[in-house]
Amino acid sequence: MILQHSKSLIMRPDLGAGDVDWMRGKVLLKPDDQLQLTEAELQEEFAKVLTTHNTRVPDSLVEWSWKLREFVRLPPPPDLVTLLNVTGTILHKDSEEAKMQLTGVTTDEHEEAVDEKLKRDEAEEGKCGRLEDYDQQQREKEKEKRVPLTLPKKEDVKKKAQLESAAMTQRMLQAAKTLERMVNQNIFDDISQDYRYWNDPSDEFKDEEGSLLPLWKFSYEKTKKHDITDMCFNTTCYDLFAVAFGTLSFNSAITNGTVCLFSLKNPSYPEWICPTESPVMCLDFNAQHPHLLVIGTMDGSVAVYNVMLPPSAPQYKSSDVVQKHGGLVWEICWPPDTEEGNLAFFSVSIDGKINHWVLNQNDLGLTTVMTLFLDRPPIPGPDGTMITLKGNPRQMMNGVYRVSSRCYVIT
């Protein structure tokens, strides 16, 4: 898949060896106020020396000494920059604090217990009567009846460690993604410059025709055998777009599909990858909630994903038996919300049905709005009754276009 800008027909040599046949020289546009240098000045070399001296470190730090009654010079601060500082939580298993944690008693509880014992000993000092002795024995028996403190389960400790590790991994992945975008920005800097300042002089000799300048190429290694069936840009993040990978052949051996989210900030790899059990035929972003993405598949199912979450499972998915189209879904779109405030979307399938789906709290609500019939006379069925044809695999429905809040055009 290649995004192209209608500006020039020249392609960069490093984008592929098959495009050498239609290469042409490019003309650089120079500003009028550019500085003119001689050939000797252009060939002059300037030496650059890298030193370890940090000019931002102060070298004249002093502080007042009350002992000497004068200002004393302080040593210069070290040339140390802390990039990451993570407070450790590891304790030696033989230490007192670790033993207290294993028994389930915190430091505060332990100190309170010691203080209470000391107070009790001080209060009972000098008493030896029968009543005081009986009360003390009753208190000791009540203490023995209490449920002893249980040690934390190994599963809980392991689960807590996994959650902390997952949080750290998420921060590391975010930092790695930022570095990857910076590297891609430096790699494709010349392409960005060509996009803004490059011009093809041959456009003057073309009548009402332009040229195309390939900018970025987006691909995913595991979808080379799939067809690109649909594409949709996000309404809020203008650099983000979703691509549906499926198949346009009914007798194809491909049984799975993929939804990828690409960003213009990182053309080398998708930002979000969601494999599906059936080839994906269409998709659409919600305008008011740009994190919601709805897809339609070849087996007639529809699903709603939250692209801010991992693509392990969809937020909503139609049932494989009851809530399902009779054929592949050609088009899908988000209309305005219902009167109750629920999100909803339309789907058009090859079976001729136009379904209206409502996102309830726990499931999808289905309503068949209408059924599209072919413009052909009815044909006799097996029992002699006349049957009107509802759909035909050769006739594709191209899209659903919104005219107003209550009117749509289906082509």
Image (spheres, helix red, strand yellow):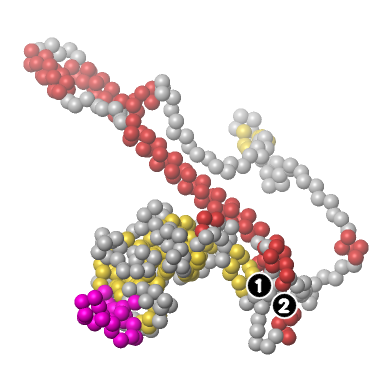
* x, y percent for residue 123: 19, 19
In which image quadrant can residue 380 be found?
bottom left
Q: Outermost residue, left direction? A: 131
User: Can residue 83 be seen?
Assistant: yes
Where, quadrant-wise, is the C terminus in this rendering?
Answer: bottom left
Q: Residue at x 31, y 75 (%)?
A: 353
Image mark for residue 200? 2
- Dot 2 surroundings within 10 Å: few (below 14), some, or many (20 or more)? some
* Residue situated furthest right in the rendering: 40
Name the residue at 68% across, 76% down: 8
Label drawn at residue 110 = none
Where does residue 46 sit, x and y in percent of width and height?
Answer: 85, 54
Image spot of residue 292 (x, y percent): 39, 64
Camera sees residue 71: no
Could you tell me if the residues under marks 1 and 2 are in contact, i.e. CB atoms within 8 Å? yes
Q: Is residue 387 left or right of residue 9?
A: left
- The residue sitting at 51% across, 51% down in the picture is 174
Image height of 345 relative to 180, above or below: below
Q: Main secondary structure of the magenta part?
A: loop
The three-letter amino acid code for the residue at tag 1 is Leu
The disc placed on residue 213 is 1
Q: Earlier in the sequence, mark 1 or mark 2?
A: 2
Tell whether 77 sits left or right of 254. Answer: right
Span colored in magenta: 368-391
Amino acid residing under circle 2: Asp
Magenta stretch: residue 113 in it?
no
**Secondary structure of residue under mark 2:** loop
- Seen at 36% across and 33% down, the residue is 157
Task: Classify mark 1: residues with Cα within 10 Å, few (<14), some (14-19) or many (20+).
Answer: many
Q: Quadrant of residue 363?
A: bottom left
